Image: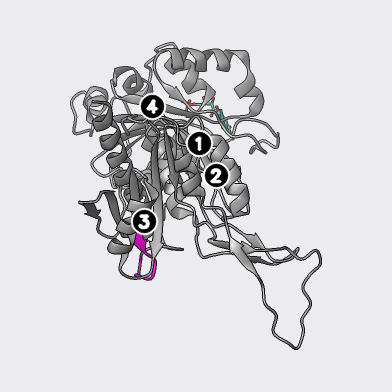
Amino acid sequence: MMESGSSYRPLAGKTILFGVTGGISAYKAADHARGLIAMGARLIPILTENATRFVTPLTFSAITGEKARTDLFDPDGAETIPHITLARMAELFVCMPATANFLAKAASGMADDLLTTITLATTAKRVVFPAMNPAMYENPVTQENIRRLREQGAVVIEPEGGPTACGETGKGRLPGWETVQEVILAAVTPPDLKGFTVTVSAGPTREPLDPIRFLSNRSSGLMGYAIARIARRRGARVRLVSGPTSLPCPPGVDLFPVETAADMALAMGRLAKDSDVVIMAAAVADYTPAACAGQKLKRGAVPINIDLVPAPDILAGLVAARPPGQFIVGFCAETGDVVPKAMEKFRKKEVDLLVANDVSEAGAGFEVETNRVHIISGTDDVIGLPLLHKEEVAERIWDLIINRMSLSTD
Ligand SMILES: Cc1cc2nc3c(=O)[nH]c(=O)nc-3n(C[C@H](O)[C@H](O)[C@H](O)COP(=O)(O)O)c2cc1C
């Protein structure tokens, strides 16, 4: 998940009308608003009168740095016709939380307060996050209102399941930040990977020595997860084959957890068959123990040797079995002399793109949020990117893939 202190601001320059209605999770919306601001968005908060019983306009003014609007007939407002001026200001309209009452009013075109009037007047994309008691949510009237809103072009996000504030368990909770940020980012991102199926590998592998020990590496999975996340955000169907990491699966991505290089080779081979793009971002073991001891290896006084045999070369296997038209991207982690080493690998591996990084460099490679990579797409074609957030690196990689794929189909 993106840190709020990150310099990566994918919502910079975007204005969002941020509606808040009178539901118990209005306090969570304040936190989500902060997250969106940290990503660079300008938020204009609009609260219903009932929302102000749960959170004050001051909270949202302080968080967003904008006057929180509550009144359709604001005598002190700068705008003559506030609902029209505001409706035209943004590229996105978000309502969070959306009460059952708001859904009913919005679905039927009622406009009896500032928020519902703006909902009707805006031509911006509308994203609505219902949150309420599970029985209210499952009520056929609410479901019918959601169906109508979707039919009218709004994106209505399913609430999360689990215990709700009213003590019941069921669907009705406002989604957490991980989902919220992806929904909002997807709403403002052109879906240029729609129709593509993508398989990405990420993280380390674990090669067992005995029932409790393994050989592994420092890969955190951040780079591969960022590639999967951005592909999904841009509309692709995404499968993520991941070695053990502590990262949550990006929303909307299908996760295939694996442990060893052999497991990863099997999963990648199977999923690559119907993929348009395959990206091997995992840090796969080069060697694996020749045998895994059946019992825990005991401490002893003399040194022991462990025989290692080469682990499967997954990238080579994928290239050998590549269906026509499939685009394959490899990664290589080097320590020093990155470009010449990567160029040699590019020639040998017959991939379409090779992304290389120096994992000994500060701020790049394993276990950090940023990376500095070189992208090789031909023997004379090397692009060196500056130090960037891994999501930004992923954006650049996808831009290049799309560019190369469209060139090859021209
Ligand atoms: C303590 C409390 C919590 C409430 N929480 C919700 C809620 O989470 N979702 C919902 O749809 N309504 C909830 N309601 C009911 C709404 O506040 C009510 O329908 C109100 O008319 C909504 O007004 P608005 O849509 O104009 O903001 C709650 C009411 C109370 C008293």
Q: From what the image shows, is residue 224 above or below residue 278?
A: below
Q: Which residue is mark 1?
A: 272
Mark 3 = which residue?
A: 345
Instruction: Between label 1 and label 3, give the one nearer the viewer.
Output: 3
Q: Nearer the viewer, mark 2 or mark 1?
A: 1
Question: Mark 3 to mark 2: distance in Å?
Answer: 23 Å
Query: How far apart are the two marked residues, 4 and 2, measured between alpha carbons?
Result: 20 Å
Residue type at mark 4 is Lys
Q: Given the current orientation, which residue lies at the most extreme right position?
A: 295
Residue 81 x, y percent position in the rendering = 21, 23
Q: Residues within 10 Å of mark 4 (few under 14, many from 20)?
A: some
Q: Are marks 4 and 2 in contact (CB under 8 Å)?
A: no
Mark 3–mark 4 distance (CA, rounded to whole Å): 31 Å
Quadrant the C terminus occupies: top left
Residue 237 percent coordinates (x, y):
47, 31
Q: Earlier in the sequence, mark 2 or mark 1?
A: 2
The magenta segment is: 356-363
Element under label 1?
Answer: helix
Judged by its main secondary structure, the magenta piece is loop
Point out which mark residue 353 bears: none
Amino acid beneath label 2 = Val
State whether residue 157 appears in this view: yes
Q: Amino acid at mark 3?
A: Lys
Figure disc tally? 4
The residue singled out by tag 4 in the image is 194
Q: Give the alpha-carbon distance from disc 1 to disc 3, as whole Å.
A: 21 Å
**Is 196 left, or right, of 169 in this rendering?**
left
Q: Secondary structure at mark 4?
A: loop
Residue depicted at x 38% and y 34%: 186
Q: Is mark 4 within 8 Å of ligand 1?
A: no
The mark lying in front, picked from 4 and 2, is 2
- Identify the mark nearer the N-term, 1 or 3: 1
